[in-house]
Image (spheres, rainbow, N blue to C red):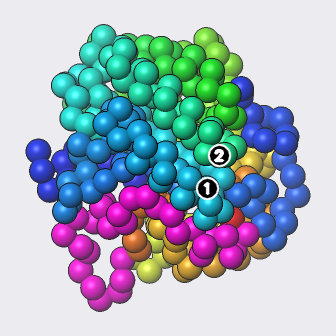
């Protein structure tokens, strides 16, 4: 989910199999999923001061207790966000000026990953989320200075992630697979993919997570050329009468058409603990046979037909996002 800047206010590899391997589809995802965990508190609509990376030092015991609650509820995997731009820290968004975050924030990230491991989680996805002027989808002209800043940030934080002792995958830029109307974003992803794989290979990355709509999926071959990732990550949110299962099936058919038949998928975002999404995705996975390793929910409730979106739609699930039972019941 593309993060709004303001909310009402100012080790590689999957557990048990090598990267790039595939399994026959079953009635369950191959591994238990979990949640996107980005914030430990919300005040009304405002969660900006409470990011679990930028503000870990402010509430370490609370964050550890929330992690324990999610793990006790059956969750086994998490998605953590590196939200950044070249401006002062906000509590969630970190200053990445010069291609790194502060020493204090690097320690916060180290401590958060240790807490996740200590809570018993077995795998993480770490998603880089540049916003504002650092987000290529906002650019009107190419900025090599900001590109280098974003790329260096990934390179500088990767050793911390790799040293965490947890199996991990890196999302190089959240929801960055572009539409046809985003040529600068396409250039950004092409260059970052080349730079990352030249430096680090591709065993520990999903490349770029993709919003699961045809207008973006059609550009996946342009992003990766003849060097696709071993694993793709999609985000599925129903809209305009098209449910998650239909979106999944369309994505599956398009990916097969492009020759991506052996790669497995992760589902990095869906509505929170949503039985409709769970059922539709389960049916689509069973009918297509596509391997899905795990699913991670985003802390937003699905909209209700005929009911207006809430005042702060990105903050509808107070942290921690413990409930995952609707997805567990469907084998996720």
Quarter of the picture holding the C terminus: bottom right
Give the Cα distance between marks 1 and 2: 7 Å
Residue of label 1: 71
Residue 209 vs 95, above or below: the answer is below
Q: Name the side, left or right, on which 8 lies relative to 166.
A: left
Element on which disc 1 rests: helix
Element on which disc 2 rests: loop
The residue shown at (80%, 46%) is 262
Q: Residue furthest left?
A: 10
Residue of label 2: 121
Percent coordinates x, y for residue 175 in the rendering: 45, 45
Q: In this rendering, does residue 267 appear at all? A: no
- Residue 160 is labelled as none
Percent coordinates x, y for residue 155 in the rendering: 50, 15
Residue 160 lies in the magenta-colored region: no
Residue 304 vs 44, above or below: the answer is below
Contact between labelled residues 2 and 1, with CB atoms less than 8 Å apart: yes
Closer to the chain start, of discs 1 and 2, is 1
Q: Name the side, left or right, on which 284 lies relative to 214.
A: right
Q: Which residues are magenta?
A: 303-331
């Amino acid at each position: 989910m593309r993060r709004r800047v303001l909310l009402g206010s100012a080790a590689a590899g999957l557990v048990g199999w090598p990267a790039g391997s595939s399994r026959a589809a079953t009635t369950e995802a191959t591994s238990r999923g979990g949640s996107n965990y980005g914030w430990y508190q919300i005040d009304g609509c405002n969660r900006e001061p409470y990011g679990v990376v930028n503000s870990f030092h402010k509430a370490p015991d609370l964050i550890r207790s929330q992690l324990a609650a999610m793990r006790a509820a059956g969750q086994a995997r998490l998605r953590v966000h590196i939200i950044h731009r070249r401006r002062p820290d906000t509590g969630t968004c970190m200053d990445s000026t010069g291609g790194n975050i502060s020493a204090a924030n690097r320690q916060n990230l180290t401590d958060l990953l240790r807490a996740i491991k200590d809570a018993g989680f077995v795998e993480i996805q770490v998603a880089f989320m540049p916003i504002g002027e650092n987000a290529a989808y906002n650019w009107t002209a190419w900025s090599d200075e900001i590109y280098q800043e974003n790329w260096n940030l990934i390179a500088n934080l990767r050793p911390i992630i790799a040293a965490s002792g947890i199996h991990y995958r890196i999302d190089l830029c959240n929801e960055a697979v572009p539409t046809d109307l985003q040529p600068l974003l396409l250039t950004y992803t092409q260059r970052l993919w080349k730079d990352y794989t030249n430096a680090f290979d591709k065993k520990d990355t999903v490349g770029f997570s993709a919003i699961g709509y045809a207008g973006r999926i059609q550009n996946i071959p342009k992003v990766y050329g003849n060097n696709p990732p071993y694993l793709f990550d999609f985000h599925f949110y129903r809209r305009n009468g098209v449910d998650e299962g239909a979106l999944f099936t369309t994505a599956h058919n398009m990916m097969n058409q492009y020759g991506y038949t052996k790669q497995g998928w992760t589902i990095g975002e869906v509505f929170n603990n949503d039985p409709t999404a769970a059922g539709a995705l389960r049916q689509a996975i069973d009918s297509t046979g596509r391997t899905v390793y795990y699913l991670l929910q985003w802390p937003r409730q699905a909209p209700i037909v005929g009911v207006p979106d809430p005042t702060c739609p990105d903050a509808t699930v107070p942290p921690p996002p413990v409930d995952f039972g609707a997805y567990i019941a469907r084998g996720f």
